[in-house]
Amino acid sequence: MVEAAAPVKGTSPEGAVSEADAAKKIREMFTLIAPRYDLLNHLLSFDLDRLWRKRAARRLRDLLQHHNALVLDLCCGTGDLALALARVGPACIMGADFSHSMLIRARAKIATSHRVPSHSGLTPPPPMALFEADALRLPFAEGTFDLVTTAFGFRNLANYEVGLREVQRILKPGGTVAILEFTEPPDTLFGKLYRWYFCEVLSRIGGLISGHPAAYSYLPKSVARFFRPPELASLMTALGFQSVDYRTWTFGTVALHTAVRSKV
Ligand SMILES: C[S@@+](CC[C@H](N)C(=O)[O-])C[C@H]1O[C@@H](n2cnc3c(N)ncnc32)[C@H](O)[C@@H]1O
């Protein structure tokens, strides 16, 4: 297990010498693993990743039911959370990610999911807009979104505080943020088994199938180094978010944090 040696500031892929370098390495890593990303996600999580996104989307149902609600799925990758959100309600969903290869896959998946047979008589929903953008410098005006979500992306930011401030900026006053992330389970028998699976099995299979072992050895290291749920909640509170709350799922292996941008 890798212990956090210093206060967690942002991701730290091996060899990164600065925040800009860390971000560059992360973008290159996701670009390389994009072709096998979905397959490995479903395989290595025993399909639980789909369940987690679906659950997160269901928890946000009240917001997603509004026709006029604007939603941004940040670090959207191949679009699985954005699509899960779109299935829950008529809100307008957009996605942003800084890896072009991930976005290409998201676009293809979204196009298929929006196809409605011509004989069905149904009007297809509007296509989802995707933006190639860095989560630390988003091309959106202050107070644009009612809801900002992110699944398994936030941990990869080069600076978590800057990332949260950027989310705060683009949220409308009273808007909601939801962050779904891996977290380390407590050190019980299950926790020990989980760490063995995560560090020994998952990283090897991921490395073999993707052809990029470094990407899948980065995964358990980045989770071990990332905030524990109460720490992330404290940072969100310290930055001025209100109603900060979190719940953990699947024996404490993932956490969903939610919070609201203050109205003033
Ligand atoms: C583990 S994937 C998660 C993808 C998707 N949300 C999902 O649930 O499968 C992390 C994604 O975050 C993106 N990402 C990481 N840092 C980013 C940043 N600073 N700006 C934009 N996207 C970023 C990566 O390109 C990658 O697509």
Image (cartoon, helix red, strand yellow):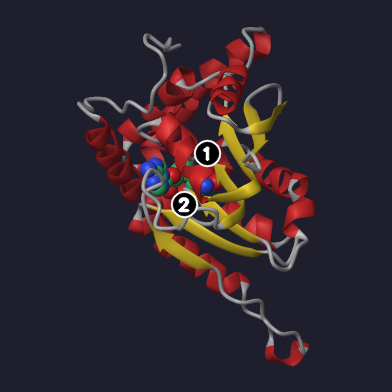
- Quadrant of res 103: bottom left
Q: Pointers 1 and 2 in contact (CB under 8 A)?
A: yes
In the picture as drawn, the residue positioned furthest to the front comes out as 264
Residue 200 shows in this picture: no
The answer as to whether callout 1 falls within 8 Å of ligand 1 is: yes
The N terminus lies in quadrant = top left
Ligand 1 - quadrant of the structure image = top left
Is residue 112 in view from this perspective? yes
The three-letter code of the residue at mark 1 reads: Phe
Q: Residue at x 56, y 42 (%)?
A: 151
Residue occupying image coordinates x 30% and y 39%: 23
State the mark number for residue 152.
1
Q: Position of residue 257 (x, y in %)?
A: 64, 33
Is the residue indicated by label 2 positioned so its CB lies within 8 Å of ligand 1? yes
Mark 2 Cα-neighbour bin, 10 Å: few <14, some 14–19, many ≥20: many
Q: Is residue 47 above or below residue 155?
A: below
Q: Position of residue 162 (x, y in %)?
A: 41, 35
| Looking at the image, residue 60 lies above or below residue 25 | below
Q: Which residue is mark 2?
A: 77
Q: Which residue appears at 35% of the width and 35% of the height?
A: 215
Q: How far separated are the C-alphas under marks 1 and 2?
A: 9 Å
* SS for dot 1: loop
